[in-house]
Structure formats: structure tokens, C-alpha cells
Image: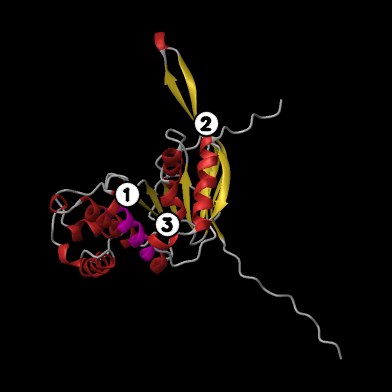
């Protein structure tokens, strides 16, 4: 009797975020009261998989931060839509954590109190807030500084606090806009490795905006490359490098070098003109 071949079930990453034909136009005032449209983003389309680390790179002014603001619900698309788990984004919500370049910490609050902020919004009891905050403060390596104020911390430590705060209220998605741009090169490398360690622990879906090709290749599963104004998707590059990653291993990898060069070429070249 011949054996019957059964269909093989292949587990595929589930789509978490869908960005569909997103265009953002800003009116710009000119002389004599006249205005004209500035197209920041044009027909941007891509999806982000659940638990994926996806970076967005592009020239200055190409709309990377605008796109992140739309994802966060802090801005809106002129046309198109953003869906999270199939539901349209209509404004900010606790399913998205945001980490910005400028830390955005409350200067009068201690490290623990800053990390607890989202938990207060969720109206968790005090003891539960302390327990959760302390866990994430330890995760970012700041347990000895939980009672310090932001001005008593270095720039890298403040960025760790901002990351702990974003993670503590357990958002599904982490949106990061040039979070390491303001720190020195050595601290930046340390924070990149720390971020990967935390991501591998928490498995959040991450969208990471950066100007640094090297940073994007080191961190990401895929990279979305945007063109200059208007911001359009030039290409989406899969970063087929093994995890866990270390800076030394990626720096000496020929595959990583080729990937960095590919992204660089896309950023340097002009997109093809549309057919008439």
C-alpha cells in the first residue's frame, strides 16, 4: 500500500503592519500669500512582519520621520492608510511605544518614575508599577541608577531610560527615530548591541529610522530604502546575516560589506524616470 503524502505546514511570519499607498502632502506658504504643495511621501507601500526588526533609511528630508509619525498616529496620511493587525491607525495608542533621538524624559522624575509613566496611564497599582519598572530598568542595565534624575545620567544612560519606558507598558510595536544619533560612536555601538539583546528577549516588532547604513545592516532583518523627495520606496533589502550578531563579526563580514554597498548605491543613484 502506497503511503499518502501529507501537505507540509510551513510556519510563516504573520503580517503585523500594512502601509498602503501612503502619501503625505504639506502646503508650503510662498511670497504674497501663495502656497504650493510639498510632497514628503508618495505612494509608499510595504508590510512589516510580526516580531521583525525593520529599518528605514533614506536621504535627509525624504520623509522617514514623517512616516514614523504617521505610524505612531501623531500625523496623518493625505491619502492611503496604515493598518495594524488589520485595523486602521487613527491616532496614538498604547500598542505602540516611541523612542526618539531627544530622550523626552521628564526632568523632575527619577529613572523609575520616568519608566513608570506609561504604567500610570494604564492605571496599574503602585506596587505593580514598581515591580514592572524595576524589571525593565534591570533589563537595560540601570538598576543602580533607579533613583537618579535625568540630569545625573549620561546621554547613553538617558537613552536606555527612554527605551525601558517604551518597553515597560508592553507595546506590541516599538517605533524608533534616530535614537542613537546624539551619542558618541563608542556609546552608539554599545547601545546597538544592547538593543539587539533586548529585542531578542522581548521579540517586539521594531521599525527603526536611521541615517546610518552600517547601523541598519547590523540591526535589521530587512531595510526599506527611500528615495529623496518625494520619499518613495526604492527597494526592500533582506539582511541575511546570522543572529545573534556582534559588531566585530558584522564589521569583518564580506556579506555585510556587500549589503552596505548595495544600500549605499541605492541612496546615491537617482530613481528611474516614470514611463510617459
Q: Closest to the observer: 123 or 219?
A: 219
First in sequence: mark 3 vs mark 1: 1
* Res. 17 visible in picture: yes
Residue 230: numbered disc? 2
Q: In the image, which residues are magenta?
A: 187-199
Find the distance from the CA under tag 3 to the CA under tag 1. Answer: 18 Å
First in sequence: mark 2 vs mark 3: 2
First in sequence: mark 1 vs mark 2: 1
User: Outermost residue toward the right?
Assistant: 1
Q: Is mark 1 on a helix, strand or loop?
A: loop
Judge from the rendering whether residue 216 lies leftward or rightward of residue 42; answer left or right.
left
Residue 73 position in % (x across, y down): 42, 44
Residue placed under numbered mark 1 in the picture: 180
Judge from the rendering whether residue 160 lies leftward or rightward of residue 175; answer left or right.
left
Q: Residues within 10 Å of mark 1 (few under 14, many from 20)?
A: many
* Label total for image: 3
Residue 93 position in % (x across, y down): 39, 51
Residue 15 position in % (x across, y down): 56, 58
Residue placed under numbered mark 3 in the picture: 251
Find the distance from the CA under tag 2 to the CA under tag 3. Answer: 32 Å
Residue under the image location 53 percent in, 51 percent down: 259
Amino acid at each position: 500500500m502506497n503511503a499518502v503524502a501529507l501537505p507540509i505546514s510551513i510556519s510563516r511570519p504573520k503580517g503585523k503592519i500594512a502601509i498602503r499607498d501612503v502619501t503625505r502632502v504639506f502646503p508650503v506658504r510662498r511670497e504674497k500669500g501663495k502656497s504650493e504643495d510639498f510632497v514628503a511621501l508618495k505612494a509608499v507601500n510595504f508590510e512589516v512582519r510580526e516580531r521583525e526588526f525593520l529599518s528605514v533609511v533614506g536621504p535627509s528630508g525624504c520623509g522617514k520621520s514623517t512616516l514614523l509619525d504617521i505610524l505612531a498616529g501623531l500625523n496623518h496620511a493625505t491619502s492611503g492608510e496604515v493598518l495594524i493587525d488589520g485595523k486602521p491607525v487613527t491616532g496614538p495608542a498604547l500598542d505602540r511605544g516611541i523612542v526618539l533621538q531627544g530622550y523626552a524624559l521628564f526632568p523632575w522624575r527619577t529613572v523609575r518614575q520616568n519608566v513608570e509613566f506609561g504604567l500610570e496611564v494604564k492605571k496599574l497599582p503602585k506596587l505593580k508599577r514598581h515591580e514592572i519598572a524595576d524589571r525593565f530598568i534591570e533589563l537595560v542595565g540601570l538598576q543602580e541608577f533607579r533613583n537618579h534624575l535625568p540630569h545625573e545620567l549620561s546621554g547613553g544612560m538617558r537613552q536606555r531610560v527612554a527605551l525601558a519606558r517604551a518597553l515597560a507598558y508592553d507595546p506590541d510595536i516599538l517605533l524608533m527615530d534616530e535614537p542613537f544619533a546624539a551619542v558618541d560612536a563608542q556609546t552608539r555601538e554599545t547601545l546597538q548591541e544592547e538593543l539587539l539583546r533586548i529585542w531578542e528577549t522581548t521579540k517586539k516588532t521594531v521599525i527603526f529610522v536611521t541615517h546610518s547604513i552600517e547601523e541598519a545592516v547590523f540591526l535589521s532583518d530587512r531595510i526599506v530604502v527611500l528615495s529623496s523627495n518625494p520619499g518613495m520606496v526604492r527597494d526592500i533589502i533582506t539582511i541575511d546575516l546570522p543572529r545573534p550578531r556582534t559588531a566585530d563579526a558584522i564589521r569583518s563580514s564580506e556579506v555585510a560589506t556587500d549589503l552596505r554597498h548595495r544600500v549605499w548605491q541605492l541612496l546615491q543613484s537617482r530613481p528611474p524616470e516614470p514611463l510617459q
